[in-house]
Image: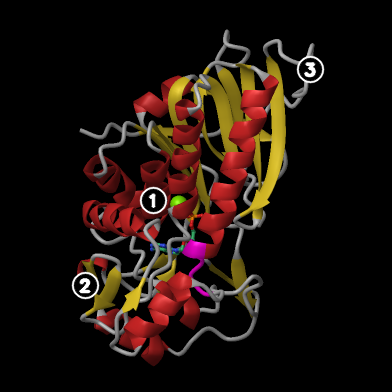
Amino acid sequence: MKRLALILLSLTLVACSGDDSPQRIHQQIYVFGTLVDITIDGAERERAEAAISAIDADFQRMHREWHAWKPGPLSAANQAIAAGKSAVIPDSLIPIIEHSRGLETRSEGLFNPAIGGLLQLWGFQADTPPNGPPPSPESIARWVDSGPSMAQVHLDGNAISSSNPAVQLDFGAFAKGYAVDLAIERLQEMGIANAIVNAGGDLRAIGRAAGQRPWRVGVRHPQGKGVLAAIEVSGDEAVFTSGNYERYREHEGVRYMHILDPRSGMPVQGVTTVTVLHENGALADAAATALVVAGVEGWPHIAKRLGLKAAMLVDEEGIVHLTPAMHERLSFEGEPPTLDIVELD
Ligand code: AMP
Ligand code: MG
């Protein structure tokens, strides 16, 4: 996947000294269709490497258990729901379902992980979305009328079912954030204080680089190469970006983007990217997607509902709409863009 909206600015990563002295350990894992960079500073090599292999194993398991359309427990659950039956799901999916249910409500349904049927209709449940004409207006209207929502998902222990056969779970807008949170938890449990887990540009950082200075990350310019702005993160913070330009299908010169508005069943237009800064990766990930759907007019309201302070939306004209808290944190690189600072209150 081409999700590289945020990149680590300083990539002079592997500065190794003696075998058990504090140092920087950097490793890449290929999972979730992207390269995940893990950087750990100031921990003994053995401990850091053990943490990275534990995270690797966790991530590979999550990828298998959480995939919406490739054969596995989630796609089996989706098939059962479509047939009006119940299915048994692994433990790891239960907190995801519960957590995303709350986020769907708080985003007023704009982030909707029961949207799998609509993604399927548009051909986005595929590694490469097919080109060709969009689905018929009737089929889209049928999906919208069927109104799938996480509120219709029932859990009884590990048994999942739904009163609505149109419910099809897809955690593509949020699983990466959730997984990054679990990785950070794993690092903290293993006594690692300074680290950054960067999943194809979406990341969460703890502590400080080399234990001393904030981690500096770059927000890639949506309309071309280079960096739009840099953000310094430290303590415990996540930065997630939803790019509405990365994945699309095309027909007769029209691009149909992969983020869909559950209210209309149609791809979102007018928004290029949204970046959210928050201490929780899962929330930042879901919120970034929800704000893309909310669009240029609606994003401040949804940002407030989700309890965000720092968020930024770049519209298709390149105008950067952002909260004062986000403005304070960004240093723009190159020619400054047109800014629209929006108070959330
Ligand atoms: P992200 O890159 O986190 O914004 O996630 C985008 C992915 O989320 C898409 O490729 C779809 O798989 C899925 N998706 C699209 N629209 C929605 C939506 N309104 N609510 C939840 N998931 C969505
Ligand atoms: Mg997201």
Among the 4 quarters of the image, the one containing residue 169: bottom left
Above or below, 210 relative to 202? above
Query: Which mark is on residue 152?
Result: 2
Q: Which amino acid does label 1 sit on?
A: Ala
> In x, y percent, where is residue 95?
32, 53
Q: Name the residue under label 1.
A: 286
Quadrant where the image shows the N terminus? bottom right
- Reply yes or no: does residue 135 show up in magenta: no
Please give the residue where the numbered disc 3 appears in the rendered image. 16
**Which disc number belongs to residue 252?**
none
Q: Say whether disc 1 or disc 2 marks the residue closer to the N-terminus.
A: 2
- Residue 203 versus residue 85 in the image, above or below: above
Q: Residue at x 20, y 33 (%)?
A: 345
Is 195 placed left or right of 151 in the picture?
Answer: right
First in residue order: circle 3 vs circle 2: 3
Q: Is label 3 in contact with label 2 (beta carbons under 8 Å)?
A: no
